Amino acid sequence: MQTLRKLDTSIAPFLDDGTTLMFRIFAALAIIICIAYQRAAIKYPYSMDYGEAPLVDQAMRLAAGENIYRADISTPPYTISNYPPLYIALLALSVKLFGPASTFTVGRIISALCAWIASLCLGRIVYHCTRDRLAAYSAGFIFLAFPYVMFWSPLLRIDMLALALSLAGLCLLTWQPDSTKWFVASALLLVAAIYTRQSYALAAPLAGFVWLLTRDWKQALRLAGLVGGLSLILFLILNVWTRGGFYFNIVTGNVNEFRMESLKFHWIEFRDTALTLLLIGGASFFVPLLSIGRKLLEQRPTPESNSEINTSMWRFISQLNPLWAISTPYLIGATLSAATIGKIGANVNYLLELCAALSLAAGTVIAWSGKQTAIQSVRPVILCLLAVAVGRLMHVSLLDFTTVLRDRQLAYPELSQLESLVKETSGPVLADEFMGMLTLEERALTIQPFEVTQLAWAGKWDQTPLLNSIKQKEYAAIIIYDRPSANERWTQEMIEAINKSYILSDIVADNKIYVPYQLQATEHPDTCPGAAWRLPSDGRLGVKWQDDGLMFFGQGNEGQVPIYAVADGLLWRPEGWLDRVLIQHDDPLKAGGKIWSLYGGMSAANGTDSLVAEEFPIGAEKIPVKAGQLLGYQGSWSGNPQWPMWIHLQFALIRTNAEFPWTSTSIFLLDPSPYLGLALKPEKETPNLQPVTCSSKP
């Protein structure tokens, strides 16, 4: 044992220097990634998140003197202000000074700065309590290394301001605990955090209360009374002023259904991302017990002294490392708040307090490891683990969280088209993901579809007036982002009303553009004049290039728009082909050549029911078919059963001289236009929908 202690004493300084350097390098890289991401996101001109535009809309209305907390949303606008007004008031000031178009940038800058303020406050809290510089900057840097923090920090959302205010309150509390002035300032900051986001009424106030409780129970009660009393008074004032609207918006308006599977999904994702930090956070609960046990052994307590030791235990912990008394309750409160991520529509912003709490816990453990002398190598081991943990956080940031911004940047040309389309559309427009296109044009929102859909499902809102407006075609356009999340943003009744009264006019940057249906729809030809082949199906709503083939969008319902063979040939339907068939023809444009036509998309929205004609069962080979013979019907299978596509046919031509099945090297995809007699613009010029237009050439 003596030999091991000597070895530990001799190598500990070298290990400490090496692991400290490694941790600093990893932390510096994480900070560089965070700064680069923030810079790119702040400059991005369009919405980065569904929740940005509603906040800008609320700021516009607040700047105009309107009540943003209406108690009755039976008439337009069908919008909800889910959060207290502090952040929105800052945005309203930006609207006044710079205009709505610049508010995206201003709001994102506020959030990014608040992330850095939160990081600084975490470091200062650790330093105030421990005087350990390494533990202090470790806590701050780990926080910024979290992919959730990096991703959320440059968004125009309320969370970073709320987090910065709450941590600033704790920072002042630990800095000058005996100063009445700073005590009051701390309480006001905690109240300000609550009136930025109401869920911040738990973790930070609890941590401040417990921390004071270990020092002066009267001061702890004063904090609870001041924070609780001010919060209640402000709530009553705002609720009376808005005639009950404040309660309706921030309480009733947050009725989203809780799903355990959603909580489980986010927990698994968080565990895989930050397992080491979760373990260190858990260890921070038990580290005080080690010190307590050591004290008990040193004092060799008798039964008479046990009572004294028990009553002074919290005070002993506070004196040994005051950070425990604040980090432990903060971690408990943040964990409870994070559990609400199981609500429908919840995002990683529900995890931000937990990221801060784990960073604080890591600083606590580092500070403890620097003061304990039993095993000097403990601190280097912890720093090594934290360096690896930061490396894992960086990996997740680069692999999973930068893709959202990258995809939006790649979609910039199409989003510019969407912006132009919105600008040129006169009359009210409904939208979801890219509602920000409206606020950029200083146009107020008519609806926040996700919020009112949740209220409709909960029986808190009657959607009948909106449905009537849709059926009466009062909206110039409806823009729906084609993602699985859309089924949480629009009720089935809304979708049915849109399908009956509107037609799909275009798909821009994965946004379906619906315009009012006109009865005088143009006739759709079966065959273009002079074409070698007939058209495979109805494309009344347009065609779109897709993987060197064409997507035909028909007008009608699933299973009603027929698909036909373009020419005579032999049909194959191999094993596993639920929604596709393949026909081999003589090539009409190349004497003696063979060509294949591929027909896909003949599946119901659930992805299991086939819409292929019964005479072509799976496994069919070399079945003769005639030009114009029915093959099946257009379906709406999108690859995800939660959100169907508009009914469609996927049509492609494949040249090959071999019989099916061919090898991959013998496949050549061809432009179907010459065979069908179509005059279509190239995909590079028109990647979106375009009308079915026959070539003027005979």
Image: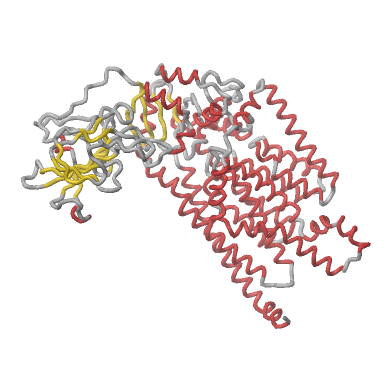
Location of residue 318 (image quadrant): bottom right
Of residues 90 and 636, the one nearer the viewer is 636
Q: Is residue 529 above or below residue 547?
A: above
Coordinates of residue 338 in the picture (x, y in percent): 62, 45
Answer with the quarter of the image where residue 421 lies.
top left
Q: Can residue 415 be seen at all in this image of the molecule?
A: no
Q: Is residue 491 above or below residue 346?
A: above
Residue 455 in the image, given as x and y percentages of width and height? 56, 28
Q: Residue at x 64, y 41 (%)?
A: 162
Rendering quarter of residue 248 = top right
- Hey, which residue is sitting farthest right in the picture? 304
| Numbered-mark total | 0
User: What is the basis of the colouring in this image?
Assistant: secondary structure
The C terminus: image quadrant: top left
Residue 177 on image: x %, y %: 79, 49
> Is residue 145 positioned above or below 242 on the image?
below
Closer-to-camera residue (284/59): 284
Q: Residue at x 51, y 20 (%)?
A: 76
Near-viewer residue (470 or 319): 470
State left or right for residue 106 relative to residue 284.
Answer: left
Q: Which residue in the rendered view is the most extreme toward the bottom?
A: 3
Asked if residue 115 can be seen in this view, the reply is yes
Compared with 249, 348 (above or below) is: below
Percent coordinates x, y for residue 545 in the rendering: 26, 39
Quadrant of the drawing holding the N terminus? bottom right
